[in-house]
């Protein structure tokens, strides 16, 4: 089948402003949108620039706006995307070139929630015990691949890039609800600030955007409740 | 720009990050990665990491070592295997202390499951040895190690692609890297360098490997006179998604999944009567390929079925959620009720940069170290995997030898000064980049790469003969010649991925030459190297590691070094 792909292009070395460019690509309905971008890059226009690596939805490199919604290009097939596809960079982060955005503010927000296990007890000889029920409380948020699809789908983040955004909150959730962690209070102090979790207006965009099917909004709400009721 | 560090680590997957955690507190350390660290392919590893914790049944590290030796078809170096299997227990416990969310037993211990080639009592039957986190163990290892690096203020240079290594007076002196965002060339002066760039499966057409896995680290070293070890041993994983190569973990069979041919027959019963579908990967891949060649592929085509339909749907959801989702997404198949089409997929390089058990790069048949040079993980060859790696042992390898390399490196830099940088250290890199950027017309990179991948898959795949390997050699030589006149579309400085891909193809070509040359000379079948024209293992002539050097004209020179044996004498490999 033939697919028309409309891609938002921008090369800072050449262009003053971004523009749309159309490509026609011969493809199969089981091809990934990433395969189509690769076909364009390898056969039609090598200047087309985007990040990609694993090509099956686990490395988080290729989040982009496809037909208006955030998705990983390697997880969306042509049969879902249709015979006319628009592709543009994720929103709310500065565009570096074509579909590549500057991820620094995204990772800064992530780092601000202390995304690592903190436990000051003496290290035991063997594993710390954790029951399946305790594990279940945070398992969903361990799936995050930091692709930024959630944060850059959030209307609050679009208008205020100081907002930590759902990905940072998801990663704080992963530790706040881990029975082995002892720094929930410090993380909740970060998330309880002006640019923290209460900026969220429960738009659910993040949950819809997550390519890992994490219940992002639910995680955000659980963090809000933990802060409000001081209970984990 | 010139930077000065005590230690530079190239690559930020499991091996690089674990090395960074070991080195960073003790010396000024930089981690250079062409991706963001969390994009590394360690994150794609699924099934588990073996260690004889004996949490669910009796086990011992010696059994683990025996399985690894046997799995390696006796080509693995036994002293290194002993170290890995012994240290595995502490490595898993340490990851747990770092915060890794392992799947747990009812009483809160780390749960363990079965995996291919892992047995109790020296091969008597499968054992539960793989510690896991659902089917995203690699993802959790990568995230956890990155998190610990953040907690320990490790300094990263994200999206810096290393293109050259500086060696002066026989010592490591630094690396040269391209900053992708700006196109700027940076020189990193360093007393020690640790390579942790992963594999190079992208030289094959059907592969489980990420686009980024182009062997940059081994490629750079190879061009600077460092030999590659055992390159002919490349693992084809039995269960890649048909046509796409995306990995479906062996954990699917560990949990009870079965391979079936067109007749619905559980064909592994014929090839490995004792452990059947849980035989090591080389054997299962050969079995699948044999079924296909003998006309028992599904509908006579080049794939077979992975059958999970008899598993408890809850087990599928809890223990294999990601891979079953891959089947739904990429094949439109529901694994709870339908069989999944699979075929062998190029998965793992057993060979690579030769090292000793402390990660030191050794550059000849006498194991002479190159001071200051280290490697760990898939890009290295210790050799703990020999001719065939057992499932889960790669995650173990990266953690154990990443740490050992990082520690040794941190010690090494305490007592030495920086080596003198060569004059115009970055000049060769600039010349290489400019030559590609300045050429207006020439061979297309995408086309050349596709030809390389096609011939490697057709002629240097699961089964090989002198005839197919000669064909591969001829093709790769021709591709290498045409590579000299490649031209790209993007001539800019900002995030020039066109340029990056062009350079990566050059590394793949060089490494493919080593693979094919080693494979042609090794006239026996052992582990992942299977010759139709020499179907038997030949210990008399080939119980030895291959070393390959790259000549200026692209020719490959081969030498051999002995396997380090130990408690386990080579025997016939039956399962």
Image: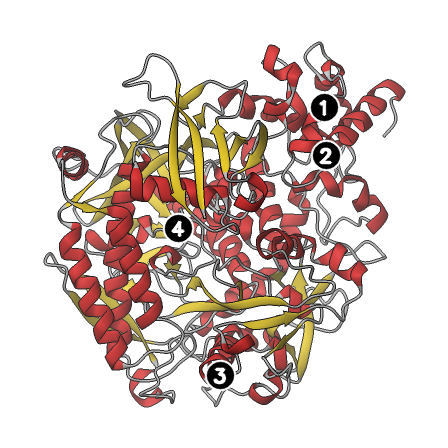
Labels 2 and 1 in the same subunit: yes
Which structural element holds mark 4?
loop
- Looking at the picture, how far across and down is residue A89, in whole percent? 48, 26
- Nearest the viewer among A189 and A146 is A146
Instruction: Using the image, name the chain to which the residue with label 3 belongs.
Output: B
Residue mark closest to the camera, 4 vs 3: 3
Question: Residue B125 has which mark?
Answer: none
Q: Residue at x 82, y 20 (%)?
A: A227
Question: Residue A175 has which mark?
Answer: 2
- Looking at the picture, how far across and down is residue B441, in whole percent? 13, 40
For marks 3 and 1, give the CA distance: 60 Å
Residue mark closest to the camera, 3 vs 1: 3
Residue at the spot of label 3: B295
Residue at the spot of label 4: B213
Residue B99: which quarter of the image? top right
Is there a contact, CB below 8 Å, between mark 2 and mark 4? Answer: no
């Amino acid at each position: 089948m033939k697919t028309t792909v409309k891609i938002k292009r921008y090369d800072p070395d050449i262009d003053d402003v971004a523009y749309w460019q159309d490509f026609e690509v011969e493809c199969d309905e089981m091809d990934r949108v990433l395969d189509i971008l690769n076909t364009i890059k390898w056969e039609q226009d090598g200047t087309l620039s985007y990040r990609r690596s694993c090509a099956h939805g686990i490395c988080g490199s290729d989040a982009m706006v496809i037909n208006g919604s955030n998705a990983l290009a390697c997880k969306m097939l042509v049969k879902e995307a249709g015979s006319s596809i628009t592709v543009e960079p994720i929103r709310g982060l500065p565009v570096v070139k074509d579909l590549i955005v500057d991820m620094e503010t995204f990772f800064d927000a992530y780092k601000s929630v202390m995304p690592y296990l903190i436990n000051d007890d003496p290290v035991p000889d063997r594993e710390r015990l954790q029951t399946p029920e305790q594990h279940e409380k945070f398992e969903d948020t361990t799936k995050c691949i930091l692709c930024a699809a959630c944060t850059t789908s959030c209307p609050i983040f679009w208008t205020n890039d100081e907002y930590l955004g759902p990905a940072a909150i998801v990663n704080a959730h992963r530790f706040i609800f881990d029975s082995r962690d002892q720094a929930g209070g410090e993380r909740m102090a970060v998330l309880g600030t002006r640019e923290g979790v209460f900026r969220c207006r429960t738009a659910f965009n993040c949950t819809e955007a997550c390519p890992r099917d994490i219940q992002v909004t639910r995680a955000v709400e659980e963090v809000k409740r933990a802060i409000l009721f001081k209970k984990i | 720009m010139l930077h000065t560090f005590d230690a530079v680590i190239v690559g930020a997957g499991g091996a690089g990050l674990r090395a960074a955690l070991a080195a960073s507190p003790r010396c000024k350390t930089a981690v250079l990665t062409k991706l963001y660290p969390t994009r590394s392919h360690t994150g794609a590893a699924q099934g588990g990491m073996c260690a004889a914790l004996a949490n669910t049944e009796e086990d011992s590290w010696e059994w683990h070592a025996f399985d690894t030796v046997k799995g390696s078809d006796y080509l693995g170096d036994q002293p290194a295997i002993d170290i890995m299997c012994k240290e595995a227990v502490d490595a898993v416990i340490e990851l747990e202390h770092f915060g890794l969310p392992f799947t747990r037993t009812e009483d809160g211990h780390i749960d363990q499951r079965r995996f291919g080639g892992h047995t109790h009592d020296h091969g008597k039957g499968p054992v539960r040895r793989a510690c896991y986190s659902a089917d995203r163990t690699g993802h959790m290892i990568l995230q956890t190690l990155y998190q610990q690096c953040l907690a320990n203020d490790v300094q990263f240079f994200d999206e810096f692609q290393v293109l050259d290594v500086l060696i002066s007076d026989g010592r490591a002196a630094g690396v040269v890297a391209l900053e992708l965002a700006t196109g700027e060339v940076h020189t990193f002066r360093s007393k020690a360098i640790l390579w942790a760039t992963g594999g190079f499966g992208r030289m094959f057409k059907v592969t489980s490997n990420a686009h980024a896995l182009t062997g940059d680290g081994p490629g750079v070293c190879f061009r600077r006179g460092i030999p590659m070890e055992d390159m002919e041993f490349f693992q084809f994983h039995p269960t890649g998604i048909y046509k796409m190569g995306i990995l479906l973990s062996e954990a699917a069979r560990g949990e009870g999944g079965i391979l079936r041919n067109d007749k619905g027959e559980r064909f592994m019963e014929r090839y490995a009567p004792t452990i059947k579908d849980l035989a090591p990967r080389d054997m299962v891949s050969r079995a699948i390929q044999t079924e296909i060649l003998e006309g028992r592929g599904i509908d006579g085509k080049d794939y077979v079925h992975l059958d999970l339909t008899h598993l408890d749907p809850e087990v599928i959801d809890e223990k294999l959620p990601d891979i079953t989702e891959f089947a739904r997404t990429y094949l439109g198949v529901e694994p709870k009720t339908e069989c999944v089409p699979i075929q062998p997929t190029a998965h793992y390089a057993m060979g690579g940069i030769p090292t000793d058990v402390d990660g030191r790069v050794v550059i000849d048949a006498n194991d002479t170290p190159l001071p200051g040079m280290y490697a760990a993980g898939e890009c290295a060859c210790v050799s703990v995997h020999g001719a065939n790696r057992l499932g889960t042992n790669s995650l173990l390898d990266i953690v154990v030898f990443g740490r050992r390399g990082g520690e040794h490196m941190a010690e090494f830099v305490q007592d030495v000064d920086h080596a003198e940088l060569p004059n115009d250290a970055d000049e060769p890199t600039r010349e290489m980049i400019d030559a590609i950027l300045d050429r207006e017309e020439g061979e297309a990179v995408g086309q050349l790469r596709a030809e390389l991948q096609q011939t490697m898959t057709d002629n240097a795949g699961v089964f090989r003969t002198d005839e197919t390997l000669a064909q591969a050699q001829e093709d790769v030589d021709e591709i290498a010649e045409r590579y000299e006149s490649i031209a790209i579309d993007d001539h800019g400085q900002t995030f020039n991925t066109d340029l990056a891909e062009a350079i990566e193809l050059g590394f793949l070509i060089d490494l493919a030459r080593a693979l094919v040359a080693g494979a042609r000379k090794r006239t026996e079948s052992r582990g992942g190297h299977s010759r139709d024209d020499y179907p038997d293992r030949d210990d008399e002539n080939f119980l030895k590691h291959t070393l390959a050097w790259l000549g200026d004209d692209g020719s490959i020179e081969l030498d051999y070094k002995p396997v380090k044996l130990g408690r386990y004498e080579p025997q016939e490999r039956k399962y």
